[in-house]
Amino acid sequence: MLNKLLGIFSKDIGIDLGTANTLVYVRGKGIVINEPSVVAINQKTEKIVAIGSEAKKMVGRTPAYIVASRPLVEGVISDFEVTEEMLRYFIQKVHQETFSLFPRPRVVVGIPSEVTEVERRAVEDAAKNAGAREVYLVEEPMASAIGVRLPVQEAVGSMVVDIGGGTSDIAVISLGGIVVSKNLRIAGDKLNDDIIRFARDEHKLLLGERTAEDIKIAIGSAYQLEEAMEVTMRGRDLITGLPKEVVVDDSEIRRAMRHSIRTLVDAIKGTIEATPPELVADIMHRGIVLVGGGSLLRGLDKLVSEETGITTRVAEDPLTAVVRGTGIILEDIDGLENVLVGSEYRREAPVHVSNISRI
């Protein structure tokens, strides 16, 4: 009864709880928060120093007793208490302009496909402990498909590839359910690691994670570019220990990420192979849609199209597709109840016809 009363003064929110970034949608307002999923903790006092954008500024620049880290690894919670505090911070931030002292909103949270029951429960419990009155879970490829307005409730096949920071989700959707899905631990963070490894092995240069990401954004590509691009890598020389800079071009960075990109493309092809023929025909007609930050890698849509023989496009504003999907679900939670997953909705959730095991 108290929860329902407090809920009257609360705002229903949708959350894309990502490895790299957390986005928050407020019903009736749209996307109000887009901040890194980073938390800085003072290990002496065990108190949180900063969350989100402020915490990301501290990565690699803090004294030893302050640790800036991500509480989510590969799309799932690795530090429950810190994730709970991060969610509480975002919920409070949404309600700071209202008179709600104890906000108890309904929350829709996007989670990777094929997560375990334990991982689902961890997200539910963290959100409830952070102040949510009701928690609804939706798989990220489903949320992104809804976010880019694909006809997920109709008897036609739609294929979505959601490339995030920690995981990539590949899914074929029809009649409000995921028919075939595949979850990979190859996404933006893995590509950053590839660049760090390349700099170390080829140039004896030690790069930071943030520098590697900047290089990927600046000249990263999955397909040969029409015009060559260059960037300067700056880091520490592993031999002398002194600062060093090296100029690299897009072909070198493409070669560094080649294996990971090949694995991703092979997974997309494998998902298509496991899809029922009628749905494959739909996908050939409608095409493949790429969403998530990783879909912005230059030429990735062209490479996927060339390898699969199916028209591939990057969704409009791919970074916000999942959180926009959670917002649409919030607006019509009864009508879209069949797309939800989680222990509270286990009976209503559609059963996958086929699942491909993880790599």
Image (cartoon, grey):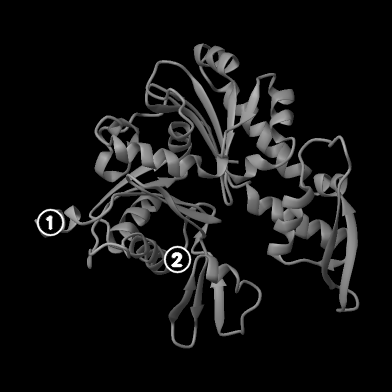
Identified at 45% across, 66% down, the residue is 79
Identified at 48% across, 36% down, the residue is 144
* Residue 114 shows in this picture: no
Q: Residue furthest left?
A: 1
State which quadrant residue 162 falls in. Answer: top right
Q: Quadrant of the C terminus?
A: top right
Against 325, is 130 above or below?
below
Against 172, is 91 above or below?
below
Q: Position of residue 262 (x, y in %)?
A: 73, 37
Q: Position of residue 345 (x, y in %)?
A: 26, 39
Name the N-terminal-most of marks 2 and 1.
Answer: 1
From the image, tell me which residue sits under label 2.
Answer: 79
* Badge 2: residue crowd in 10 Å (few <14, some 14–19, many ≥20): some
Q: Residue furthest bottom?
A: 44
Q: Which disc number belongs to residue 5?
A: 1
Horizontal side of 111 relative to 210 (left or right) equals left
Residue closest to the eye, 323 or 263:
323
Against 138, is 308 above or below?
above
Estimate the spatial distance between the alpha carbons at disc 2 and disc 1, rounded to whole Å: 31 Å
Please name the amino acid that badge 1 sits on. Leu
Horizontal side of 147 relative to 230 (left or right) equals left
Q: Position of residue 89 (x, y in %)?
A: 38, 66
Please name the amino acid that badge 2 sits on. Asp
Residue closest to the eye, 121 or 206:
206
- Of circles 2 and 1, the one toward us is 1
